[in-house]
Amino acid sequence: MKRRAFLKTAVLTGAAAEITASTSSGYVPAHNWDKYDFGSGPPITDRLNQGPFPQYPPEDLFPGGDVVMATTPASEPVPNYGRGLVTYIAADMGTAEIISNDKSKAIDDLARLPLGQKLYIRPTWREVQQRRGRLDFPDYWKLTFELARKYDKRVGFRIQMRAPDYPEEALPDFVLEKVPMVKLIGEWKSNPNSVRGRKKTFEEPRYDHPYFQEAFRELNALLAAELDGSPLVEYMDTFMYGFWGEGHTWPFTNNPFPDYQTAERTWIRMWEIQTEHWKKTPLVTNTQPDFSLVGNSELVDRTIRSHNWLRTDTIFIENMQIESISNRPPWIAGVLEIAMSDGSPDSLYISEGVPGTDNAIAHVMDVGANYWSLWNFHKISAEGIMNYYRQYPQTIDLINRKVGYNVRPSFVWYYEGGGYPGLILGLANDGIAGVPGALRINVVSDDGNVNVWIRVTRCPARSGRRSSCCRRAQSGKGSSSKRSSRSRGFDTRCDGPAIRRLILMALSRCGRI
């Protein structure tokens, strides 16, 4: 996608004034993300002792220290919160994107695909709410959540307020009846046979209109009352400006606001409405550069500082999107949406022997993603995903094992001191990303006499990043165990923004995952 504007000079519809960074209150200038001060990670009140752990005099604080277990990386994907491959059920076009005459069966086929650990849907506001004061979810939404429960998966979602690939309007009638619309200026040269190609004009609402703000607040309140903190929900995409909710109306040259300051204030207010209602479910904000001049830089900055997550909706894009997604703080998850081939010859795009999808996956791994999309762009089907996988399984198998974090106690030392037995853990991360939040570790014995947990705040960096191999941490004081108790193993769990506690893995006594 081409971007042809910067904040230094811009002319917006309804105003012919030059807008500069110095005249906006929230604008965040471009900066290098590596080591940038976004503040600290999630606050932890029960942090595990992270060393050092000397065992010989004169500092024999942890005497003994025998290695009693050593583990090796998993050979299969390890499902967990905060990581995984995401099977797309419906995206830009709703169920029209699903290639099947039997939509329900097609959705079931997609939901039970073993490759994907998460499901994703992207309905419009009109689809989820037809009248004030209540939600009326479409059948495919209800079915997706039913199947998530059935197949032990979780759902990510976005509510589109503008959907150029839907033939019908994305906003509900009660909004359209009261909120003015502004025509976008320019031309979108699309396939004339596509939905967007047949549209003669494109409009955006006055998001700053009082009625729009009132209805938007109600929508978030209704959604959060039902879904915030739900065990079936993985994350929700942040509501953003424009097409698909990505934060832009490219290639059009205007936006519906009278000036930049109004646009920025409006979207900051809408961000605050979202964070006011969504306390447990992570909000995932697109790293979209501010082509349409609506305040995206401030939304991204606030996302990081509130310990929410980032996403990007393609991979071969502007360098600043790659800068932000690949150098985000380690406690922030990165969601990567990149379409894949359906295995048909004209969709493979093989260059120098490498299919386009394998090339994209390699770059998704380069930026350290927590999630990657199983999505046949505008031609969704389980068979399309599997047709490609049967031909080229190696790279998908690789990202399925490596995407996100995969933390294990590589070394386990046992010691006795101060009247307590204890363990020192040398943690290794076999994944390509950090833990989104804090890591919780459980130590459990077969007889139940030991069941203690603690959190590690400085988790091992993703493999390949600048970090030592292992991060050491100590557990022991307060345990009632004796050395003769048989250890059932460890659970490592991710506490994300919702303070979720979900099992990453259970190590058998033989020490393998």
Image (tube, helix red, strand yellow):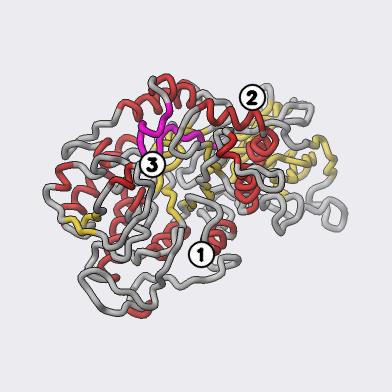
Crowd band around label 3 with a 10 angstrom C-alpha radius: few (<14), some (14–19), many (20+): many
For mark 3, give the secondary structure. Answer: loop
Crowd band around label 1 with a 10 angstrom C-alpha radius: few (<14), some (14–19), many (20+): some
For mark 1, give the secondary structure. Answer: loop
Q: Which residues are magenta?
A: 84-99
Residue appearing at x 45%, y 43% in the figure = 498
Identified by mark 2, the residue type is: Gly
Residue appearing at x 24%, y 68% in the figure = 13
Quadrant housing the C terminus: top right
Residue at far left of view: 177
Q: State whether residue 17 is above or below residue 475.
A: below
Residue at far front of view: 192
Q: State whether residue 484 is above or below residue 328.
A: above
Identified by mark 3, the residue type is: Asp
Of callouts 2 and 1, which one flags the residue occurring earlier in the amino acid sequence? 1
Identify the mark at residue 448; answer none if there is no mark.
2
Identify the mark at residue 38; answer none if there is no mark.
1
Q: CA distance from mark 1 to mark 3?
A: 32 Å
Of callouts 1 and 3, which one flags the residue occurring earlier in the amino acid sequence? 1
Using the image as rendered, state which of residue 328 and residue 246 is in the foreground: 246
Residue matched to label 3 = 92
